[in-house]
Image (cartoon, grey):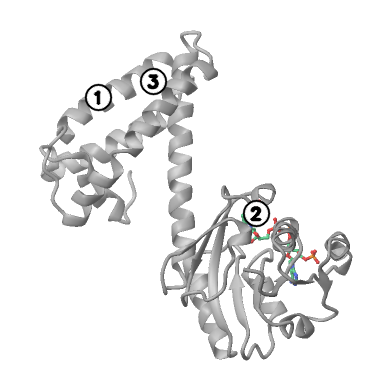
Amino acid sequence: TTAPVTVLGLGLMGTALARAFLKAGHPTTVWNRTAAKAAPLVAEGARLAPTIGDALAAGGVTIVCLTDYSAVYDLLDADLDGATLVNLTSGDSAQAREAAEWAGKRGARYLDGAIMAIPSSIGTDEAVILLSGPRPDFDLGALGTVSHLGEDPGLASLYDVAGLAMMWSVLNAWLQGTAMLKTAGVDAATYATFAQQIAVGVAGWLPGYAEQVDKGSFPAEVSALETDARAMAHMVEESEALGVNAELPRLIKAMADRAIEAGHGGEQYPVLIREFEWAGELV
Ligand code: NDP
């Protein structure tokens, strides 16, 4: 667990990564375009590489954490023969797959990654680090909870954005309810406790619903989409009557209505997967 590592890019995140490696006892080499940013890490025991070539030659895995992929290409436009790169720079899955090809041509082993954490949580179990590409034979456990998702280098980015969809959907749903309840004098904190119970309860449905999606079969075991749509109508009408924003309720209902129109009203909610797989627009 204490193999040597190199960190390229010492912004807010790269600094947190390097610090976590140092704390865990990894011999850590660092490099940054603006070398001065390395000073605190050097004081904590990091070795500052004078050049990128020197940093790459330090051995072990090289973590890259820059602003974006174009910075990665600018910086590593060199022979990367024998290097193992783990690119934790944020991007989309196409960028990740392209970078994997680019690095492969230069002789590097390439893993792409996504960091689902803020700098202050790096080094704790709370920090989720997703990796994809060749199965790692190194240990990045010093950074947090690390998962290897598969060989396709685009997977880490895809999981990352899928997670964002989950995060913002839960937060928006909570804000919708908060706005509704505020009209009755209920404060956000009071509702939050109740909302949290619902969110946790609904999260428990996911594995069973996922089975229906994977089988492509949606028997209404709990409730039919038609029944759900009637509840959605209450949600829209209540929002309109209270004078709060009804956009999200209307969107939710419009998707269900479309599935019902297509003949799926007697099936269970996850039949809506078809509405999400479809790349059209609601107009
Ligand atoms: P910062 O802006 O703090 O740091 C950016 C880093 O990129 C600096 O080290 C900068 O060097 C370097 N850089 C930019 N362009 C170039 C270039 N052309 N050549 C060489 N180096 C370059 O950003 P963060 O550290 O916060 O973010 C880094 C990555 O981590 C991003 O992709 C971000 O999305 C991701 N991330 C960040 C999170 C966060 O909470 N901060 C959370 C999850 C992911 P210099 O110091 O010389 O300017």
Whole-Å distance between the Cαs marked 2 and 3?
43 Å
Q: Quarter of the image for the C terminus: give it.
A: top left
Mark found first going from the N terminus, 1 or 2:
2
In the rendered image, the vertical position of residue 219 relative to residue 41, given as above or below: above
CA neighbours of label 3 inside 10 A, class few (<14), some (14 to 19), many (20+): many
Q: Quarter of the image for the N terminus: give it.
A: bottom right
Question: Amino acid type of disc 1?
Answer: Ala
Camera-near label (2 vs 3) is: 2
Whole-Å distance between the Cαs marked 1 and 3?
12 Å
Camera-near label (1 vs 3) is: 1
Whole-Å distance between the Cαs marked 1 and 2?
44 Å
Q: Residue at x 74, y 71 (%)?
A: 27
The residue that mark 1 highlights is: 231
Under circle 2, the secondary element is loop
Mark found first going from the N terminus, 1 or 3:
1
Give the percent coordinates (x, y) of residue 92: 51, 64
Under circle 1, the secondary element is helix
Give the percent coordinates (x, y) of residue 179: 48, 20
The residue that mark 3 highlights is: 239
